[in-house]
Image: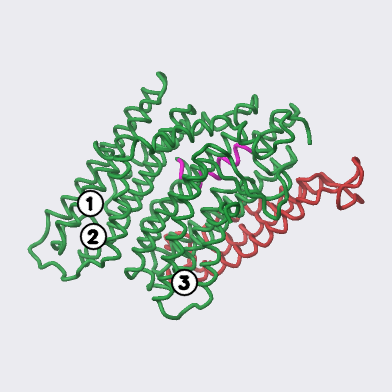
Chain colours: A green, B red
Amino acid sequence: MIQHLIILPIVLPLVAGAILLRSRGGATRPKRIIGVTATALLVAVSIALVAQAAGGEVTYYALGDWRPPFGIVMVLDRLSALMVLLTSLLALGCVVFACGGDDEQGSNFHGLFQWQLMGINGAFLTGDLFNLFVFFEVLLLASYALLMHGGGKARIQAGLHYVVLNLAGSALFLIAVGVLYGATGTLNMADMAQRLATLPAERAGLVSAGGLMLLVVFGLKAAILPLYFWLPRAYASAPAPVAALFAIMTKVGVYAILRVYHLVFGDQAGALAALDQPWVWWLALGTLVMATLGVLSARDLRLLVAYLVLISVGTLLAGIGMRSEAATAALLFYLPHTTLVTGGLFLLAELIGKQRGKAGTRIVKGRPLHNASLLGVLFLVGAAAVAGLPPLSGAIGKALLMNAASAEQQPWLWPLLLLAGLGSMVALSRAGSTFFWRSHAGDPIEQPLAKRQLFGVAWLLAASPLLMLLAGPVSDYTQATAEQLTHPNLHIRALLPETTDGGEA
Amino acid sequence: MESLYAVTTGVLSACGLFLTLRGRTFPVVVGLTLLSYAVNLFLFSMGGLTTDGAVIVDGPSDYADPLPQALVLTAIVIGFAMTAFAVILAMRARGDLGNDHVDGEDNREDRSS
């Protein structure tokens, strides 16, 4: 049983999703129970995985017992365990929130949700470039349907752009995988890393072309500067629990950049090492600037939160662009915080919008809220956390990141990061004061908050104070993760013990 | 043969890219289809083009790489499913938004085309 643990985050949602999709209609209650139970089990499994990976050993699961580099492998190290745990924690909040009514707006919500989780977990665990593509497709397919859950003009329109862009991205991904396979003769990432060390010089151009094409694909997923224009509208129009789950989708891109350019294009790759670094660094700073402008100009709370997702992407990618162990550790600390809090804010925006009737989430004067004090406190916590105000976890993450910047990086990173924080603070306080203080004299809508929805919001927003209290152990873990990531040799040796001399297989 | 193969792939992807950048959903869907054909051909050739080679390793000199065939099969299946989805989505968008422009609104005068 215990050796099969690594595959469980993929098999569990697959089975749950298959059961849920068996009937399209039917009673909602059993579906909710299955969906929530499967997600809660996923949390338990991923905690066990983190416990297994925390020792620093890289373990893998060979499907059909075909040894790497020939078979398909799922690799568990500290980074993938952390990402799987983060996914399951976020998903639990989203699925409980959805049980408050959002899942009834269309069909098959819970089944698609589980398969989306399968794709995300698979992308985090796979050790093989082609399977990364397959799991990207799985998560994208589920996300296409979830994005348009409930229908409506805005969703269809945003969904069309999202689908077409991602289809083009998938085509580019396949071309990049093809080029890399043609040049190196392998798809296993650890094996590819090893072969790059002895790459014939005439193939270096081909490999760097393939590597940079991969960066475009991952950049599209992560929503980096020239490739982010699809994000704000898609996230702002998606149903709240879906938008909250999508907070992890950009991080899939960030994860893929981290994994591929540390493992495959790591230090052993010679001239090809750190292929992504100059691009990611400058484009990340550009993303920060554009996202800050977007946050300040947003006239709708959901759009505002979508731009906050972009700020977090810019911050994380700037951490990757610095390419030092300390910066990686810092961004890995910032990543769980920003994912859970932006997810929580998407859910909170939905609750606020519901109580304002026609005005919805638009940042205009509306009727007073029925539960103004409770929602106001939640909004305050979320806003302070996401803007990076001390004492919450956002401040710790940003401080770690700024501390990790080298002397020539500081003049760029510090002002942009701090201005992004200031921009989000200004925009959020304007939104908050409009929602909670500047209201018409009308009567509030007598609509009590659904307990499940409130639980979902509180679950995700509680991450910030918890991360602050547990900052010590968490940053120890992320420090160890960064160390593991910057020494890919351990990873390669764990997967390919017999060919560590680096010769052609 | 190799140059013919390369030219075919190139022309297909160029046409696909051009059509994908059009403003209406039908050319975009056709463009994505052409693009996926080009990608499948490209993937198929990534193990090197050989004729009369054994399917599996048969001596060190003359064999056809079996892996790209497995990969291209996966890519074809995924691409086919995605094309079907994109077609349905485009039809839904046409129905819901009232026109077939990718932005959902037609600002130009030539509605007859």
Whether B97 is drawn above or below A361: the answer is: below
Whether the residues at callouts 2 and 1 have beta carbons within 8 Å, the answer is yes
Chain letter of disc 3 in the image: A
Q: Earlier in the sequence, mark 2 or mark 1?
A: 2
Residue B106 left/right relative to A393: right
Q: Position of residue A230 (x, y in %)?
A: 44, 51
Question: How many other residues sit within 10 Å of disc 2, few (<14), some (14-19) or many (≥20)?
Answer: many
Whether the residues at callouts 3 and 1 have beta carbons within 8 Å, the answer is no
Tag 1 residue: A379
The stretch of residues the image draws in magenta is A211-224
Tag 2 residue: A352
Q: Position of residue A345 (x, y in %)?
A: 30, 52
Q: Earlier in the sequence, mark 3 or mark 1?
A: 3
Chain letter of disc 2 in the image: A
Whether A265 is drawn above or below A101: the answer is: above
Mark 2 is on which residue type?
A: Ile
Q: Residue at x 55, y 33 (%)?
A: A276
Tag 3 residue: A108
Is A304 part of what is drawn in magenta? Answer: no
Is A221 part of what is drawn in magenta? Answer: yes
